[in-house]
Image: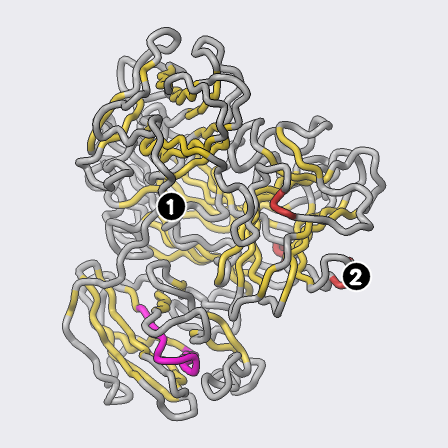
């Protein structure tokens, strides 16, 4: 028998863990999460909402302007019919439950507030109320009955105008039945097919004008050819699955079906580790700037390397202009690379086989559009591939501004060796050079002017802080791009050595009027303190909570550990490949389309091998925290799942590790909730959470599978 140890839906929040499902919204959403398959998010508010004549002035819990509640903001850019949903944790069946909450529906533009019971077979409308109600908090309750695992979804629908803020507070569950309240809340008892569709994992960009070098592989290789001189095997043109379990795509990218075509490298026998396959374009001699774009699929525990070269000769490839290594999840991803030729060239895609057969790599929809890739900022986002750095500036008082750079910085033992965008030495980033500058010197990178929207904005960026004497990186929001004294208080900060890796940083801001975002780097105590930035972006709405991830659109700020373990966590959906082990659905959506993280323990894995997944590094706080996650551990050979806390004993690196939670052996064929109180002894210093799965003894059969699935981190 095989082993499975999946988990999903991880989150971390201040304070002690609440009772399952109960929430007064004083410290966030507790175990409730904003869903992805809607139009906007529920927000945490206090006092009055931003719009007059709608929404509460106090919360229900404390009945003060300092107390918190959850609400939907109906102002622009929201339009009638826009939907916002939050979802509870998953509950196991058994007996009647009563779901109780308080609601506030006041305003001329109130839409609807709905409550659903969601199971794998569909959604049941339990409670629904529309239109302007009394200007007060009112009590609601509804009975919950299900013979299968279920979740509860609260849905707010924007009404006819901006005076339509809907608020809820003090949601709770009890283990007894109850009558509907209010009686006119119109429960629709029928079960319907879910209208809550799974979000797409990728979004298409506008299609550029076609060129003769474009290819979607539906009718062959177009003008592209196999390398017959310098590689060990060929790319294969295929439809549907590649033929090996737990690797490669099941659909092409162009049509999104098993009837569309793509090309891939087949990693099965007789292929050997590091065998290469190359496919190349014709020689292009027009010297026109172009944007190379393509979609790639790199999924499997043995995935190795995909490289792209711009070269004159297949026998002399030079340095890759784009590169990705390791599994990227069971999804198609898009890449863009600017081509600025000075002589004739060809484009070469090179796939490198990993250590075993679960290493299929695919590409589709290759385009060679004339013109640039649009690296100039979009909504002031920037990947720093252009020397204009998207119009970002610095204070005139900065004596050593951020430098535009590619490859390694000038000092060994600090700074990145490649950018984040392309993952190669050809890609660009900006950084603070720590050599020959004074201790505690600050330098700044300032976005162009931006105009505030009606709600919060999520600032996302990638940062690299590696070196023995790292200082600090701070983010500010300011109304001035000339006066450093107006920066105010930092909305995000990190210090200490964060390791030789790019980390995701994000901060929710609520700006007013015209504003700028300022990145401030502080020089540490020696030259080993280079700090770099890349891939800055902005998105309307709140950022996901620090440490939270449901894995529907990637791994968020969680990353596989590069040193100290034996293999990696993988992102997948649906059933695992082994019978009698693993989940059939994720926890977030409760469907086969939802994603989770798992461990693949087939050969060459051996008993005792471990895989570690690391959170972002959290700044020090003087309050405790609660870490919540969902795990699935089912199978006779399941070994152990452990959560560790990692803190820094020195100012230079993270060195102290403590075990906070562990579970060994199978825990049933269901998703289970785990929660861990993290005391201030650990949170008083910067800390990191590590989730470790250990491969069990397995069984001498066709396959050995240990699945540890993570969702809603």
Side (left or right) of 475 relative to 547: right
Residue 221 drawn above or below residue 439: above
Near mark 2 (Cα within 10 A), the count class, few <14, some 14-19 or many ≥20, is few
The x, y position of residue 508, in whole percent, is 56, 61
Near mark 1 (Cα within 10 A), the count class, few <14, some 14-19 or many ≥20, is few
Q: Going 43% across and 75% down the picture, which residue do you hit?
A: 74
- The way the protein has been coloured in the rendering is secondary structure
Task: Say what secondary structure mark 1 lies in.
Answer: loop
The x, y position of residue 120, in whole percent, is 21, 58
Q: Going 34% across and 34% down the picture, which residue do you hit?
A: 210
Residue 233 drawn above or below residue 359: above
Task: Please indicate, yes or no, whether residue 642 appears anywhere in the rendered image.
Answer: yes
Seen from the viewer's position, the closer of residues 291 and 152 is 291
Side (left or right) of 540 relative to 581: right
The quarter of the rendered structure image containing the N terminus is top left
The x, y position of residue 203, in whole percent, is 36, 48
Which of the two discs, 1 and 2, sits closer to the camera?
Answer: 1
Residue 352 drawn above or below residue 169: above
Task: Say what secondary structure mark 2 lies in.
Answer: helix
Task: Please indicate, yes or no, whether residue 267 appears anywhere in the rendered image.
Answer: no
Which stretch is magenta? 153-170
Q: Going 63% across and 65% down the picture, which residue do you hit?
A: 514
Seen from the viewer's position, the closer of residues 453 and 476 is 453
Alpha-carbon span between mark 1 and mark 2: 42 Å
Find disc 1 in the rendering and name its residue.
Answer: 206
The x, y position of residue 31, in whole percent, is 41, 64
Find disc 2 in the rendering and name its residue.
Answer: 485
Q: Going 23% across and 65% down the picture, which residue do you hit?
A: 93
- Examine the structure image and report whether residue 707 is included in the region drawn in magenta: no
Given the current orientation, which residue lies at the most extreme bottom position?
A: 134
């Amino acid at each position: 028998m095989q082993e499975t140890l999946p988990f999903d839906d991880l989150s971390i929040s201040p304070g002690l863990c609440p009772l399952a499902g109960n929430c007064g919204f004083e410290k966030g959403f507790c175990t409730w999460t904003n869903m992805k398959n809607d139009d906007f998010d529920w927000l945490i508010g206090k006092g009055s909402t931003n719009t007059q004549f709608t929404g509460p002035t106090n919360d229900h819990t404390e009945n003060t302007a300092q107390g918190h509640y959850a609400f939907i903001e109906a102002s622009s850019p929201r339009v009638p019919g826009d939907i916002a949903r939050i979802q509870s944790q998953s509950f196991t069946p058994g007996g009647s439950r009563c779901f109780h909450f308080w609601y506030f529906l006041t305003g001329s533009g109130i839409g609807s507030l709905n409550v659903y019971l969601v199971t794998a077979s569909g959604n049941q409308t339990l409670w629904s109320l529309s239109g302007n109600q009394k200007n007060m908090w009112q009590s609601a309750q509804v009975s919950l009955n299900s013979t299968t695992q279920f979740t509860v979804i609260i849905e707010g629908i924007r009404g006819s105008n901006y005076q339509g803020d809907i608020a809820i507070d003090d949601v709770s569950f009890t283990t007894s039945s109850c009558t509907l309240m209010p009686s006119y809340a119109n429960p629709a008892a029928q079960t319907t097919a879910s209208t809550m569709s799974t979000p797409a994992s990728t979004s298409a960009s506008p299609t550029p004008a076609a060129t003769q070098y474009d290819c979607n592989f539906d009718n062959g290789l177009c003008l592209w050819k196999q390398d017959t001189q310098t590689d060990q095997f060929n790319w294969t043109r295929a439809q549907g699955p590649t033929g090996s379990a737990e690797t490669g795509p099941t659909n092409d990218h162009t049509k999104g079906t098993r009837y569309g075509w793509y090309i891939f490298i087949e990693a099965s026998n007789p292929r050997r580790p590091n065998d290469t396959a190359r496919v190349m374009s014709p020689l292009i001699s027009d010297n026109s700037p172009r944007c190379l774009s393509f979609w790639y699929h790199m999924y499997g525990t043995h995935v190795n390397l995909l490289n792209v070269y711009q070269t004159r000769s297949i026998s002399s490839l030079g340095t890759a202009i784009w590169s990705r290594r390791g599994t990227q999840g069971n999804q198609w991803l898009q890449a863009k690379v600017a081509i600025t030729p000075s002589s004739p060239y060809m484009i070469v895609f090179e796939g490198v086989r990993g250590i075993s057969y679960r290493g299929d790599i695919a590409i589709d929809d290759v385009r060679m559009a004339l013109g640039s890739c649009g690296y100039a900022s979009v909504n002031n986002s920037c990947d720093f591939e252009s020397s204009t750095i998207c119009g970002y500036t610095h204070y005139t008082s900065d004596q050593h501004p951020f430098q535009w750079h590619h490859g390694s910085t000038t000092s060994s033992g600090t700074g990145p060796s490649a950018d984040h965008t392309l993952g190669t030495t050809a890609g660009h980033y900006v950084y603070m050079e720590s050599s020959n500058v004074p201790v505690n010197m600050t330098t700044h990178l300032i976005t162009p002017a931006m105009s505030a929207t009606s709600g919060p904005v999520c600032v996302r960026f990638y940062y690299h802080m590696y070196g023995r004497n790292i200082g600090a990186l701070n983010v500010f929001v300011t109304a001035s791009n000339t006066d450093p004294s107006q920066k105010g208080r930092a909305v995000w900060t990190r210090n200490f050595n964060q390791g030789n890796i790019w980390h995701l940083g994000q901060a929710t801001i609520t700006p007013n009027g015209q504003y700028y975002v300022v990145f401030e780097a502080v020089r540490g105590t020696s030259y080993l303190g280079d700090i770099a930035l890349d891939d800055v972006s902005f998105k309307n709405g709140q950022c996901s909570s620090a440490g939270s991830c449901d894995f529907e659109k990637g791994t968020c700020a969680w990353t596989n550990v590069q040193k100290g373990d034996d293999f990696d966590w993988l992102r997948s959906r649906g059933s695992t490949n082994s019978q009698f082990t693993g989940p059939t659905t994720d926890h977030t959506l409760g469907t086969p389309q939802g994603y989770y993280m798992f461990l693949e323990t087939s050969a060459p894995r051996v008993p005792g091998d471990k895989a570690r997944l690391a959170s972002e590094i959290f700044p020090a706080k003087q309050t405790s925290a609660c870490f919540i996650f969902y795990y699935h551990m089912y199978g006779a050979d399941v070994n152990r799942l452990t959560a560790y806390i990692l803190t820094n004993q020195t100012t230079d690196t993270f060195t102290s590790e403590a075990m906070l939670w562990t579970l060994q052996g199978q825990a049933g064929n269901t998703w289970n909730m785990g929660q861990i109180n993290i005391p201030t002894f650990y949170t008083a210093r910067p800390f990191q959470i590590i989730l470790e799965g250990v491969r069990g003894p397995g069984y001498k059969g066709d396959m050995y599978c240990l699945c540890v699935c993570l969702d809603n981190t």
